[in-house]
Amino acid sequence: MATTFVSVPLKKTTEVDLAKPLSKFILNTYPSGDTQAEYVKAAEELNKLRKNAVGRPLDKHDSSLEILLRYYDQLCTIEPKFPFAENQLCLTFTWKDAFDKGSIFGGSVKLSLASLGYEKSCILFNIGALASQIAAEQNLENDEGLKSAAKYYQLASGVFQHIKDTVLTALNREPTMDISPDTVGTLSQIMLAQAQEVFFLKAAADKMKDALIAKLANQTADYYGDVFKQCQYKENLPKEVLPVLAAKHCMMQANAEYHQSILVKQQKKFGEEIARLQHGSELVKTVASRYDEYINVKDLSDKISRALTAAKKDNDFIYHDRVPDIKDLEPIGKASLVKFTPVNVPMSQKFTDLFGKMIPLAVQQALSIYNQRRADLVNRLITQMRESTNFANGVLASLNLPAAIEDISGDSVPQSVLEKSSSVIQQGGLQTIDQLIKDLPELLQRNQEILDESLKILDQEEVTDNELKAKFKERWQRTPSNELYKPLRLEGSNFRSTLDRAVEADKVVRERYGNNSEVIGLLCKPEAELNAAIPSGNPTKSLQGSEVITLLKTLLASLNEVKKERETLENDIKSVEFDMSSTFLTALAQDGAINEEGISVTELDRIYGSYTERVQKNLKKQEELLANIQSSHEEFSKSTQSNNVANQRDEMLKKLAAAHDQFVELLRNLREGTKFYNMLTEILLKFQSKCSDIVFARKTERDELLKDLQQNMAREPSAPHIPPAPAYQTAVTETSPVPTPAPRTVFQSKPQIPECTSSSPSVCEKQPKPQPPARPPPPSIGSTFPGAPFSSAPASSSAPAPTGSSAPPPVSASPASIGATSGLSQAQGPPYPTYQGYPGYYPMPVPMAYNQFGYGQYNMPYLFQPPGQPPFQSSQQPQQPGYPYPQQHYYQQ
């Protein structure tokens, strides 16, 4: 019994460069080093894997299926590690409908989507299709081939069922017909039915019990019958699928009846045996008569015929058992041995993850939020310590400490002021600050230009998308740009706000610099000039060696220790490093999700809790020292002499101390601002690159969509509206008769010869064979004078007829005649269009001098024209041709 199995064609795709966008994302996301280079190499390997999987014809072999399985597994593993989305890592995949063959007006139906889920669904479809093709190629004559075929059909069924369950979620839009849930659900049932048939074939080959074989065949027939009902209204499947399924249903039902007949024969139910064999014979005859092109059931038919003949003979001569109606028989049982193979990743047993060391995207996002929480905590602690230092310096400057207790002679620069002056000079003084302030506008402008350019390309693409949406309306089926760019525009707004705040901060720095630049410039001068700028005076000379000065010096030394401790503590806090990747990966593996907030807060408290306590102790100690310093300074002030010169000197020393603190603060702020702008430039360049990539991907998608729309429009039948004819064309007068259409030539059908029904070839040979029709008589040539026209009359009757005779004019044997009206008659061959304003087709007349034996329109001889008579005019009415053409009416024009 030769059988036919349904196999599914592969989907075809276009080339997609995976290496470039993935490598770009890796370079922008991961730090340079061995790990980054390894990830870039893995991206290139993934691109090669796709080319091997879908970029070339695949053999119907296990090795080709293994490539598809490996590529699908790799897609599943990279999906959580890369941000595949239209507004992030945008990769557009284009796939053609597997069952659509296209038309002369355009290619086959295809769909382009920037979705990795779409790529996975199409690869799964090809896995199922190739599995069905491999199964159809197996040798079903041996046990190994039967096992392989059953395995691959069940794999194909499971793959198609998985697509049915996941495709709408993966695409979020209507897919092509081949991967629609309805179609892949039907394909899954077809594969399952074919797997059941393979089990039937194996049971029959192993000569199992007829009861089991009958149940397997009946279940197979049920599967085919169900899927046949599903396919009746599906126009996208190949045309041969439906008859194959119908034939398989009948054939498997016939097999079930045959094996059940053997079983009932053993039970001495000879009438039921005959009834079942008769039913099986009818089913086989149905297949042979209707579906012989697809299924060959000759062996099964012969087997059932022999069994039926023997059963009838035995029953007629021996048993005389009543043959019941087939409807009255007990139904045959069913046994299903198949189930679809579920899709579990990895599907390939040889799969190795190319990006095994890369952490998933969920972990990356958790790490990003954790790092932001950590940065906020560190910045808060450092800000508290720096503000405390500035506050302490401000208090000391307002008290003129330590300069007030160091000024012994009254005519020299205090040691603390000299140290502050030396520090300012070593750091570049005003020149350094001037240069930093000068660089800020350039850095700001560069960042603003990058941001403006990034948003500009988004605006341009959005305008184009809106124009096409307005033009094509509901045909323009893709995500609108204004919705797609919302995250990018929000990110751009944040960058814009950040730049605005930076501008305000720069303004504050410039104002502070303008208020303190003069005194800072004084600190940059040599010691002699600095000493000359400070008024002379010695109000503390009489207090040297007193207890209050000694106490103040001790307190100031302790305060310096506290400030140095803060500097050390700040460096320690900045240097703390802790990798949270393993913690988040463990949480993801255990729970399937990451509670980032709970984990991060707990870990930050554990890591930075001790540092927070040390900072708070340091700040509290400084607060106590400042209180003691202020109290001691009040006592010191009461003991000093007060005069104008001393007050002027004291005020100058305070200004110099405050100017030093302002210089340090300005220098730190400007350097941090410069670093901020440079870092922001890198971030904005990545943002610009992201915008450029998505706009390029959208442009590619737009071009593909436009091409598809043009092809679809070309396929659509055109029905132009013909405007009504003008009044002057429709007005019919007596002098302008309406042209009549040319009469069509009607050919007589050939006489039907009854078919020979005899089984003897000799009898059929004696029957008369159909004879061809007789040829028309050849035209006779009149020769009354040289150059006379041909005539159908015999030569003996070429004399003119007597006047008044009623004899008809001579009839021409040519298929058409020249009309007797003022115009030419319509042609008698294939009709040419004739309507108002278009008189029809007329051949150009050939001059008589060209060839006196030449023929004119439709093989008519040119008539001799007497002198003085208009050309192509005759007093005769045109005659219709004779046999084999029927006589037709003549229409004058």
Image (spheres, rainbow, N blue to C red):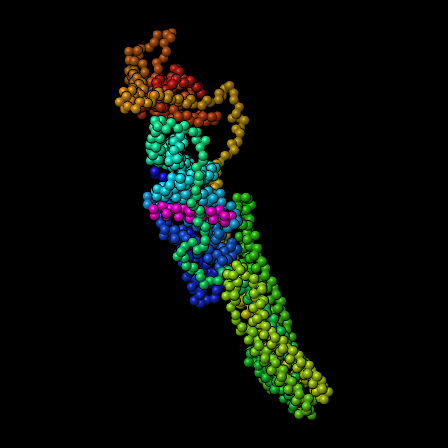
Q: Residue at x 28, y 15 (%)?
A: 783
- Say above or below: 387 vs 818: below
Magenta-tinted stretch: 143-168
Q: Nearer the viewer, residue 78 or 831?
A: 78
Q: Position of residue 488 (x, y in %)?
A: 55, 57
Residue 420 falls in image quadrant: bottom right
Q: Nearer the viewer, residue 446 or 402?
A: 402
Q: Nearer the viewer, residue 104 or 191?
A: 191
Q: Position of residue 556 (x, y in %)?
A: 64, 84
Task: State how many labels appear.
Answer: 0
Q: Residue at x 55, y 44 (%)?
A: 473
Task: Check residue 532 for magenta coloring.
Answer: no
Q: Residue at x 46, y 66 (%)?
A: 32
Q: Residue at x 35, y 15 (%)?
A: 811
Q: Is residue 516 something one can see in this rendering? A: no
Residue 825 falls in image quadrant: top left
- Say above or below: 579 vs 652: above
- Say above or below: 398 vs 145: below
In what quadrant of the picture does the N terminus appear? Answer: top left
Q: Position of residue 72 (x, y in %)?
A: 43, 53
Q: Position of residue 144 (x, y in %)?
A: 34, 48
Task: Check residue 163 for magenta coloring.
Answer: yes
Q: Main secondary structure of the magenta part?
A: helix
